[in-house]
Image (tube, rainbow, N blue to C red):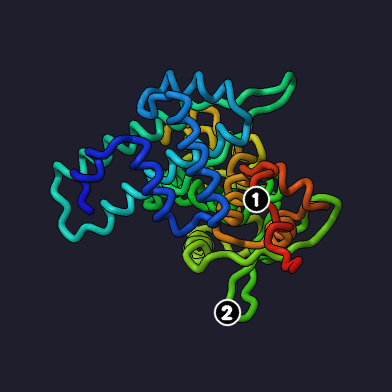
Amino acid sequence: MNLPVLLSQNPAQRYLDAIERNPNLLPTTKRQYARTVERAVRDGVNMSDPLALRDYGQTVSVSAALYLRGAIASWADRLQLMIESQVQPSPESVAEAQAAIMRLNALSRAIRTRQQSGEKAHLWLSSYETHRLLIAPDPTTLQGMRDKVCIALLVGAGLRRNEATKVTWAQFLRQGDRWVLSVLGKGAKNRVIPIADEMAQLLLSWQRISDSEGRILRRLFKGDRLGDSLGSTSIYNIVQRYGNLIGHDNLQPHDLRRTYAQIGYESAIPLTQISKLLGHSSLAVTQTYLNIDLNLEETISDFVPFS
């Protein structure tokens, strides 16, 4: 189906179609997203009205609001994939789709979950937003390359901010067919984090430019002179700067770690492995990182062969 036909569909149908076609979502997540969209439609919510979605998000459970945001993000991701898959997209169709993606991201941000007193709001980036964040720094400059590496360590390896400040080139290792990061985390616990080849190539490029020893993340002075390790405040400022560029004016470094966990969960990585990669002490801690809630409509017990 082409872009003009897709863009002419009603919003709810677009969301349901995008959810069904999203290869990164688990079947259970697809069902949860679809049920949430269908429930909102039954409740009379205008799915293209940010104010209506904002108000609706305050009346439903936190998980329902997050599922609704995920459904909208799935549609934005699909539009982006359709643009990239077209051999010779017309400027008009690209502009129309990009405008639609911007509207969808605005709709997603309009949904706010109810927050308990003293509770800090959490944020998970969609795949499309994660991609935009990673390509935002200019890798042709020393600062842009350094910033790109910084963001990659947070969202591509799930490092805590203080871990990113301390990780050294000696911890960037080749193990068999994979590049890995060997990280010393909380409680002096070591963990090995396999990373994507594309991220490894980014690190290798930065290593050739910066230094083959010492800390991976370094301060920069005037004249592109490299200093010592980058502090945690500087990492915070980097995330804030590029978060602003993608429409999230208060993006936190820990939001990128949560996004890393959520990407793993939606890509069918076992929860136990996600927990290990994050360096968590228990699965309960890992579950707080994920955009999931207890599903009473479907559970593991339903699939146990009792008879």
Q: Is residue 292 rendered to the left or right of residue 92?
A: right
Asked whether the residues under the numbered discs 2 and 1 touch, taking CB atoms below 8 Å apart as contact, a structural biologist would say no
Image coordinates of residue 50 in percent, x first then y, are 41, 23
Residue designated by label 2: 177
Q: Who is closer to the viewer here, 171 or 21? A: 21
Q: Residue at x 58, y 46 (%)?
A: 259
The amino acid type found where label 2 is placed reads Asp
Q: Is residue 302 rendered to the left or right of residue 134?
A: right
The amino acid type found where label 1 is placed reads Glu
- SS for dot 2: loop
Image coordinates of residue 94 in percent, x first then y, are 21, 45
Of the two numbered discs 2 and 1 on the same chain, state the one appearing first in sequence.
2
- Tell me where residue 16 sits by quadrant: top left
Q: Is residue 141 visible?
A: no
Eye-nearest disc, 2 or 1: 1
Q: Residue at x 69, y 44 (%)?
A: 296
Q: Who is closer to the viewer here, 21 or 170? A: 21
Q: Is residue 49 visible?
A: yes
Does residue 244 sit above or below 273 in this rendering? above
Q: Residues within 10 Å of mark 1 (few under 14, many from 20)?
A: few
Quick one: which residue is furthest to the bottom in this view? 176
Quarter of the image containing the C terminus?
bottom right
- SS for dot 1: loop
Image coordinates of residue 1 in percent, x first then y, are 23, 53
Which label sits on residue 298? 1
Q: Residue at x 51, y 54 (%)?
A: 25
Q: Residue at x 73, y 57 (%)?
A: 301
